[in-house]
Image (cartoon, rainbow, N blue to C red):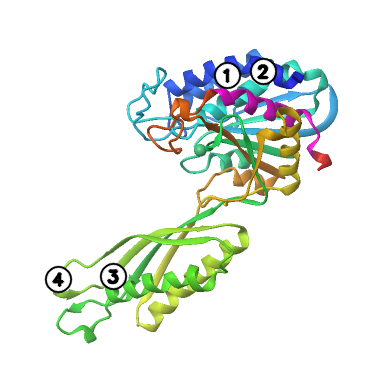
Amino acid sequence: MNEILRLSGEAAEKAVALRRAIHRHPEMGNQEHKTSALVVKTLESLGWAVERPVGTAVAGTLKGALPGPTVALRADMDALRIDEATGLPFASEVPGVMHACGHDFHTAGLLGAAMVLSRCRDELRGAVKLLFQPDEEGDGGAKRMLEAGCLDGVDAVFGAHVDPDLPAGTIGVKYGKMYAASDIFKVVVRGEGCHGASPSEGIDAIAIGAQVVTALQQIVSRRVAPTDAAVVSVGTFHGGNQLNAIAETCALEGIIRTLGPETRQKVKGLFTDTVEGVCKAMGAKAEIVMRESYPGVVNDDGMVGYIAETARRTLGAEKVAVLTEPTMATEDFGYFTQAVPGAFYKIGVRNPDIGAVWPIHSPRFVADEAAMGNLIAVHAAAALGSPKKY
Ligand code: NI
């Protein structure tokens, strides 16, 4: 067994204990006070320089003995508004809040990597920066850490997410586009109200809004290439108060999900053209409010190759899976990969023997803690290597 794997196995015992403590006391986005205090305490005990860049975020830095690049590793700390139903002995003690997305696992795994790296300081080239971020599930804690300068001087950034579709301990890597970009829209169709018996005296906002919904279906089915991925979903539609009156306005809201920045720009442009065009053709006015959410994760292929090679060397080739399917889910790690070359990867936590067959965000989601050592080993080995060569 190589040295990193041996040290990671030792660190995993402590990391699992930390993970259980965090799992018992889950905290919602931007309220990660106990979690971040535990992170600070652990990093300081290991000799890391600790900063509090913004809100509940924590950044820890360890400088190596040799010159070299600065590698950042990221974990998210926030939980979800879900009532835990796992029956685990260390289940959530906070009613209605649960670590159902494995962020407890990510945080503990990064602390485990801190333990290993502290012991390998003599071999460390450059520096390692650990980023413990708030609010991944909410409004993008990664963006606020980026704006606070947390990636200044960083040469490469890596992060990982638990995956109940992969066997426990398997590392999953994905080249290129991995998570979707997300945009949220609200459209108000402005017509003119009148008596329902004489519709030609007004402009029927509901009839036009219905045409807008129908026309929007053309974007993905007819305007985006079948090999590109996009979703346009209308989730709410409200209009009218009086059954014998023509509604003056109607409002619809929904989401746009796209893979890759080109598809994102194209779909957003088509959306605006479609809504405005349909409304104009039928005599109404359209008001569109579009709010940009997470930018999508597009991995740097060189950095993916680096993680894959690092994981193969550390764990063995049989523990590395190259994933081919992206997801239309979102992940705010994309703010980091937009700023610095980086790669997001998966750590398998599936073990049917302990019931780990539920998806993330399920109240029954269970992660196999046997995977902890491998997560720690890949994080630590990635920080000790030289991503610049890739
Ligand atoms: Ni998550």
Disc with the residue nearer the chain's start (3 vs 1): 1
Q: Earlier in the sequence, mark 3 or mark 4?
A: 4
Left or right relative to 210: residue 228: right
What's the distance in space between the residues labelled 1 and 4, CA to CA?
62 Å
Is ligand 1 closer than 8 angstroms to the Cβ of mark 2? Answer: no
Please state which amino acid type lies under the numbered disc 2.
Answer: Met
In the rendered image, is residue 152 in sight? no
For the residues bearing labels 1 and 2, Cβ distance under 8 angstroms: yes
Front disc: 1 or 4: 1
How far apart are the two marked residues, 2 and 4, measured between alpha carbons?
Answer: 67 Å
Callout 3–callout 4 Cβ contact below 8 Å? no
Side of 384 relative to 331 (left or right): right
Mark 1 / mark 4, whichever is N-terminal: 1
Q: Amino acid at mark 4?
A: Leu
Q: Which residue is mark 1?
A: 15
- Disc 1 C-beta below 8 A from ligand 1: no
Q: Position of residue 249 (x, y in %)?
A: 28, 70
| Residue found at x 60% / y 46% | 334
Callout in the foreground (3, 4): 4
Upstream in sequence: badge 2 or badge 4: 2
Q: Which region is colored magenta?
A: 370-387
Q: Is residue 2 left or right of residue 376?
A: right
Q: Label 4: which residue?
A: 243
Q: Does dot 3 land on a helix, a strand or a loop?
A: strand
Q: Residue at x 66, y 49 (%)?
A: 338
Q: CA distance from mark 3 to mark 1?
A: 56 Å
State left or right for residue 179 relative to residue 283.
Answer: right
